[in-house]
Image: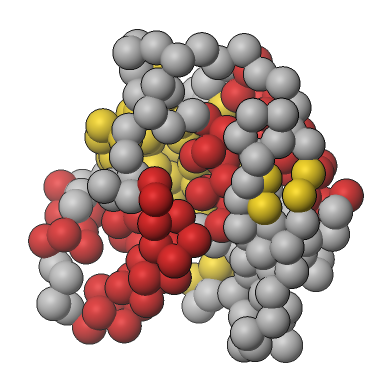
């Protein structure tokens, strides 16, 4: 049985975040930890984050509703095949992960906060697997765009492991961003356009409701 885990980070000298694994119990743990100092300044200049955290249908729906997020695109990153199709991705042989490219305003939501949401939105301890979705395309990954993003991602990954917030070690890949290929049109805005479908109702909607209980004040 997997344990539920809740982590709390403050956003000045420390960042408050609630972390949780997929679980079958209602038990939670809560801690406070000091965050690394970072040089992100409040600005109207937009920034970009790229994450792989399982099926992009689910995670796209989460990040689209975050204040300060301007655009979320579902697609593929981290592989070698140029312009891959979804059919190719599903074979698990292209090297790509299903990924989100998130354009955001750091004056409203910081990269650190997006990292908190990233680690909460999936199970980062299962290698090449999220729930019933199995394959390298579902791996947990942070594709960093600059050295600051790399430092923050590495810091939080180590901190979460050191604090043993998950029952198992985090296997999230932290890799330099190279290329992002947008997925086919029918994958974009999937939940918003297909909310009445069974997968959306019984898989995505519960995840959204769970996320809102933790990050409700960050939602649009």
Is 106 above or below relative to 190? above
Q: Position of residue 160 (x, y in %)?
A: 77, 50
- Camera-side residue of 88 and 29: 29
> In this rendering, would 70 be left or right of 158?
left
> In this rendering, would 15 be left or right of 87?
right
Is 205 above or below relative to 57? below
Residue at horizontal 11 percent and vertical 61 percent from the top: 193
> In this rendering, would 46 be left or right of 32?
left
Type of colouring:
secondary structure
The answer to whether any part of residue 178 appears in the image is yes
- Camera-side residue of 215 and 55: 215
Residue at horizontal 37 percent and vertical 70 percent from the top: 209
**Mark count:** 0
Q: Residue furthest right?
A: 162
The answer to whether any part of residue 126 appears in the image is no
Is 194 above or below relative to 216? below
- Camera-side residue of 107 and 135: 107
Residue at horizontal 34 percent and vertical 17 percent from the top: 46
Residue at horizontal 45 percent and vertical 15 percent from the top: 42
Q: Position of residue 197 (x, y in %)?
A: 17, 78
Q: What quarter of the picture does the N terminus occupy?
A: bottom right
Q: Position of residue 212 (x, y in %)?
A: 39, 62
Quarter where residue 206 is shown: bottom left
């Amino acid at each position: 049985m997997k344990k539920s885990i809740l982590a709390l980070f403050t956003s000045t000298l420390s960042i408050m975040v609630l972390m949780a694994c997929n679980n079958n119990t209602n038990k939670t743990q809560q801690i406070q930890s000091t965050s690394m100092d970072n040089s992100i300044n409040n600005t109207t200049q937009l920034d970009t984050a790229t994450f792989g955290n399982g099926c992009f249908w689910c995670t796209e729906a989460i990040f689209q509703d975050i204040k300060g997020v301007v655009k979320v695109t579902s697609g593929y990153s981290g592989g070698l095949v140029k312009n891959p199709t979804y059919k190719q991705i599903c074979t698990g042989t292209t090297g790509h992960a299903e990924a989100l490219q998130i354009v955001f305003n750091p004056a409203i939501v910081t990269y650190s906060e997006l990292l908190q949401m990233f680690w909460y939105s999936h199970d980062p301890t299962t290698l090449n697997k999220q729930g019933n979705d199995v394959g390298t395309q579902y791996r947990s990954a942070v594709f960093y765009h600059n050295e600051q993003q790399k430092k923050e991602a590495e810091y939080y990954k180590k901190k979460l492991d050191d604090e043993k917030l998950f029952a198992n070690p985090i296997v999230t890949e932290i890799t330099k961003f190279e290329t992002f290929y947008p997925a086919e049109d029918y994958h974009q805005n999937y939940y918003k356009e297909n909310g009445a479908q069974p997968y959306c109702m019984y898989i995505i909607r519960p995840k959204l409701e769970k996320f809102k209980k933790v990050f409700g004040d960050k939602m649009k």
